[in-house]
Amino acid sequence: MFCTFFFLEPNIIYHYMFGEMISLRKHRSKEDAVKITAVIISLTAFILLTVIFTSLTKKIQPQIISICENDAKRNASALISQILSEELKDGEFSYESLVNLNYSEDGTVTSVTHNAGQINRLIAEVTQNLNKKLAKSSVFSTQIPIGTLLNSPYLNGKGFRITIKTRQSGSAEVNISSMFTSGGINQTLHKIILEINVLVNCISPPYSTEVSYSQQYIIAETLIIGEIPQGHIMLK
């Protein structure tokens, strides 16, 4: 075969050698074109998906934030009720243990004083127990229809349900106050009120928000015969 190739005419050899090279170049050019086309398509798809994801993320953000806020407030309210129920169930912090009423000879209440030690203890225990629970990062789940999530007036409450998970943690501040109100003819109602302020960090990736929740709870009250006592100190 070598001898046969050796005696081929020069033009045949030229076409044989360079023809193969040209053919190879054309083949490589087609491969490069296919690769470039694939890269362009992939890049276009990536940009398109990024735009869609960004637009969708902005559209559903208000709904996610609203869910976080509602969940945080609901959970904070339930937690506060649970803590107060545990603290007050034994009657250790009754009205009589928090307030001292002083009477005149005719039985009229002349002054109201507060048991500072007992009140401070109540505030400390409620604050400690609340913060202990709130400091633990807890995960809560809520299911919401896709139509509601997209905030569509035509699809509200419709479509398959999506599970939204939120991670919540926070802290609480507890204060106490007292209030005198009219309880009827020649009667005064005295209330001891806990003011609880909770700050919750709520995270539902990629969203996060800070939720504040405040509520007042009447923990003790009594009906005093007569007008508001002249000698009293309002709790603040």
Image (cartoon, rainbow, N blue to C red):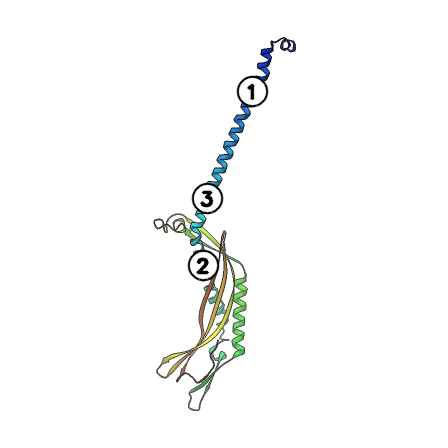
Measured in 3D between alpha carbons, the distance from the residue under mark 1 to the one under mark 3, in whole angstroms, is 43 Å
Circle 1 sits in a helix, a strand or a loop, which is it?
helix
Q: Secondary structure at mark 3?
A: helix
Q: Residues within 10 Å of mark 2 (few under 14, many from 20)?
A: many
Q: CA distance from mark 1 to mark 2?
A: 69 Å
Up-down: is 101 above or below 89?
Answer: below
Q: Residue furthest bottom?
A: 105
Residues at discs 1 and 3 in contact (Cβ within 8 Å): no
**Residue denoted by label 3:** 51
Indicate which disc residue 22 carries: 1
Q: Which is nearer the N-term, disc 1 or disc 3?
A: 1
**Labelled pair 3, 2 in contact (Cβ < 8 Å):** no
Q: Nearer the viewer, mark 3 or mark 2?
A: 3
**Could you say where residue 44 lies in the image, as x and y percent from the top left?**
48, 38
User: Counting other residues with Cα less than 10 Å from the Cα at mark 1, is it few (<14), some (14-19), or many (20 or more)?
Assistant: few
Of the two numbered discs 1 and 2 on the same chain, state the one appearing first in sequence: 1
Which residue is at 49% across, 40% downward?
46
Label 1 vs label 2, nearer the camera: 1
Give, as a three-letter code, the residue at label 3: Val
Question: In front: 79, or 209?
Answer: 209
Q: Quadrant of residue 124?
A: bottom right
Mark 2 residue type = Glu
Q: Is residue 143 visible?
A: yes
Is 14 placed left or right of 189 in the picture?
Answer: right
Judge by depth and name the residue closer to the eye, 182 or 225: 182
